[in-house]
Amino acid sequence: MAITAKYLIVDGVKVCCETNNGPAQKGTIVCLGSAGRDSRQFHGIMDELKEQFEVVAFDMPGHGKSWPLKGNRVISEYHEYGDFIIKVVTELGIINPIYIGCALGGNTVFYIAQRQPVRAIVSMAGGDYTPNVDQSVIDMLNYPYSNVQYSHYDFTESLIGSAASPENKAFILWGVCSECGVVKAADYGGVFNGFDVRAGMRDITCPTLILRGEQDWTAIEDKLKTMMESLISSPKVVYKVLAGLGHYSPQESPLLVAGVISEFISNR
Amino acid sequence: MEKAVMLEKFEQVKDLINGTEAVNFKEKYFARFFSGDITLVFDKVPYTLTFHKGTMIDVMYGKPLTGINFGLGGTQAQWEDFYKHRNFQLATSAKRNPNCFEFLGSSLAFRQNNNVIAHLLRVIAMAMAK
């Protein structure tokens, strides 16, 4: 069966949720996306894993086909962001999920794993801490004279690895071309900005896979290694560098990334 | 690099950006909407490039009398580093690069024309490699 979608009401917000309708016996994988993006980011992964796992992806409020919060607002703080995800997953009836996240999602998996039992987590281009940025940077993400669809085009292109197929690269760029300033400012300037769960990393007790695109210039190896050393309660921490890939690894090469994730889950 | 040599290099930049890189520059990176000045500073020595709808029409030694619209400044070492990796976003990332270029002029104009200056710098790197 192809990917199908349905709507849930969570905290009064209509949330669009997609599933690949795969088997749930080995666990359900929940996908958490990058700043400003929607669940289509994971369609490649969902297709690749459809014979092995049930894979679910949903659009946060204001993203993709989900409604915004009341007053046309978007969640702009990381505790609220992570807690909303937990509510959606609870509403979907998913027990003991496997969370995979990219970029902002790659940070959020650590927040969630510190708060509830999860089967495993996969962090792609994520971290336990992102420092605050200048307010002027945040302001210009949702600014009447500067459109994020254009101002972030080159930035997004620089994040894509050379091994991404032309089609996958084009769709990642389509993502930035269709971004909304309100959403980007909330995600990047709110949720991501000042994200800090370092103090709770010792509380993560699930197997953890950390993936870094070899060509992702935003990922700093030393900081990733420090983060991994703080996962003292995780029974298994695996770190892999994905050759030729950048910041958007699950979109750049869903086949490769799905294989790495599947192997990790099967051997956790 | 000496002034005469730099100006000669900028003539090569002009040939590239108005020639083989024109379609890329004007269409993909939206330079067809840009008219104005971009000032680049190399070891405290400024050069200003002037554009009309994405075509480079002039280069001069110095800053515009009306003030800097927007641009970047760096030491020769920073420029040499950029010519090697050619990653504009890394070269201008205060968050990821402790040795990033200095922003000049209007931050808003820089942000509005981010794609234009990004590709201009890559073309400059091409010319410097020749």
Image: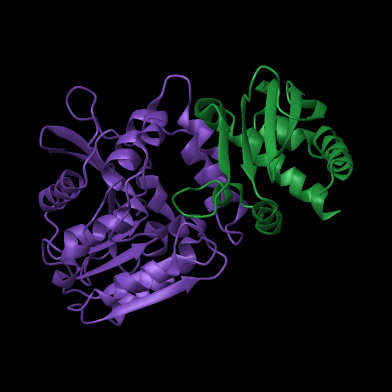
Side (left or right) of B2 relative to A50: right
| The N terminus of chain A: image quadrant | bottom left
Residue at the spot 55% in from the left edge and 52% down from the top edge: B90
Residue at the spot 22% in from the left edge and 65% down from the top edge: A24
Residue at the spot 31% in from the left edge and 36% down from the top edge: A63
Q: Which chain is purple?
A: A
Q: Residue furthest front?
A: B44
From this view, report whether residue B5 is shown above or below residue A101. above
From this view, report whether residue A237 is shown above or below residue A65. below
**Image position, residue A263 (x, y; %):** 37, 77
Side (left or right) of B37 relative to A167: right
From this view, report whether residue A90 is shown above or below residue B110. below
**Image position, residue A17 (x, y; %):** 25, 45
Side (left or right) of B10 relative to A127: right
Looking at the image, what colour scheme do you see? Answer: by chain
Residue at the spot 44% in from the left edge and 61% down from the top edge: A219
**Image position, residue A60 (x, y; %):** 26, 41
Question: Is residue A221 visible to the viewer in this orientation of the structure?
Answer: yes
Q: Nearer the viewer, residue A131 or A148?
A: A131
Q: Which chain is green?
A: B
| The C terminus of chain A: image quadrant | bottom left
Side (left or right) of B117 relative to B128: left
Total marks shown come to 0
Q: Nearer the viewer, residue A181 or A89?
A: A181
Question: Is residue A97 visible to the viewer in this orientation of the structure?
Answer: no
**Image position, residue A19 (x, y; %):** 28, 52
Q: Quadrant of residue A115?
A: bottom left
